[in-house]
């Protein structure tokens, strides 16, 4: 059974930093690209970032580019999101999601499995 | 603003058929995938590629595409289908993008 378990969400002040983690199990982690998707309270889903199976290629939404960094450690079956210069509008539930393919840019990919999310609140 | 447009809310009578649509230029080139999200839960994949369902998704869910519009059809809607539904495809840069979501109410 595929499991994705996010952690690291807390209350942080504007301008602060945070690192989210996602522990994966139940599948061959380094066969798949991975994503972070967020959902602000009462709002829709927003794709945040993606990373290829080997970590060599990373992609970001315009809203987080230059502030967030996605990474992975295939030896630990783990995905990370380093979040810097946090803003109130970054407040959201952050989901880790498994792609169906090794590269997030390959046509036809989709989000096979999702974690339950970790809540990030940016507030003074 | 999203490059994929969905109606904010749709309703359907119990047992009837409902179509949820998603419009965007990228849909001319890419298939949409569809996700169901119930309150307090993570999204779940219900349709991917041309019209494929993951295991465990009832066959009353189906997908289609025509021009720049993708559709999710529920044939014989059940009370448990009441949820938010999101389409996903690509933006003009090739990044993933979600539609704004459609809240489905089963009457």
Image (tube, grey):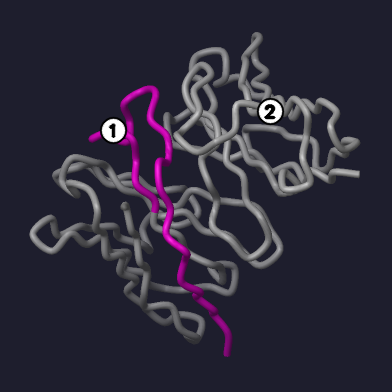
Task: Indicate left or right for A112 with B79 as reference.
Answer: left
Q: Is residue B87 above or below residue A114?
A: above
Within the image, what quadrant is residue A6 found in?
Answer: bottom left
Residue A71 image position (x, y, % from top left): 23, 58
Residue at screen point 58% across, 51% down: A45
Give the secondary structure at mark 2: strand
Residue A122 image position (x, y, % from top left): 54, 79
Task: Indicate left or right for B66 with B45 as reference.
Answer: right
Residue extending farthest to the top is B67
Q: Nearer the viewer, residue A26 or A36?
A: A26
Residue B22's disc is: 2
Number of residues whose C-alpha sits closer than 10 Å to that of mark 1, classed few (under 14), some (14–19) or many (20 or more): many
Residue at screen point 54% across, 30% down: B47
Q: Is residue A5 magenta?
A: no
Q: Magenta segment range? A: A97-124
Residue at screen point 68% across, 28% down: B22
Residue A93 image position (x, y, % from top left): 53, 67
C-alpha distance separating marks 2 and 1: 23 Å
Residue at screen point 13% across, 55% down: A74
Number of residues whose C-alpha sits closer than 10 Å to that of mark 2, classed few (under 14), some (14–19) or many (20 or more): many
Q: Nearer the viewer, residue B55 or A77?
A: B55
Residue B73's disc is: none
Residue A101's disc is: 1
Q: Is residue A118 magenta?
A: yes
Task: Indicate left or right for B81 with A50 as reference.
Answer: right
Q: Is residue B41 above or below residue B9?
A: below
């Amino acid at each position: 059974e595929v499991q994705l378990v996010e952690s690291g969400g807390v209350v942080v002040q504007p301008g602060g930093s945070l690192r989210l983690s996602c522990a994966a199990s139940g599948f061959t982690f380094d066969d798949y690209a991975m994503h972070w998707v967020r959902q602000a309270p009462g709002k829709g889903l927003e794709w945040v970032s993606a990373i290829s199976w080997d970590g060599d290629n990373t992609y970001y939404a315009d809203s987080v580019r230059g502030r967030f960094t996605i990474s992975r450690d295939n030896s630990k079956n783990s995905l990370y999101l380093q979040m810097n210069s946090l803003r109130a509008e970054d407040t959201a539930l952050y989901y880790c999601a498994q792609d169906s393919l090794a590269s997030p840019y390959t046509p036809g990919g989709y989000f096979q499995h999702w974690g339950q999310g970790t809540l990030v609140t940016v507030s003074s | 603003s999203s490059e994929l447009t969905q109606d904010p809310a749709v309703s359907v009578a119990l047992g009837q058929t409902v179509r949820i649509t998603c419009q965007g230029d990228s849909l001319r080139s890419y298939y949409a995938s569809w996700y169901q999200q119930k309150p307090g839960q993570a999204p779940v994949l219900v349709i991917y590629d041309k019209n494929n369902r993951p295991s465990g998704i009832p066959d009353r869910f189906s997908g289609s595409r025509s021009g720049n519009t993708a559709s999710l059809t529920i044939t014989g809607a059940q009370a448990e289908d009441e949820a938010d539904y999101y389409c996903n495809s690509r933006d003009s840069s090739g990044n993933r993008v979600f539609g704004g979501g459609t809240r489905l109410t089963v009457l």
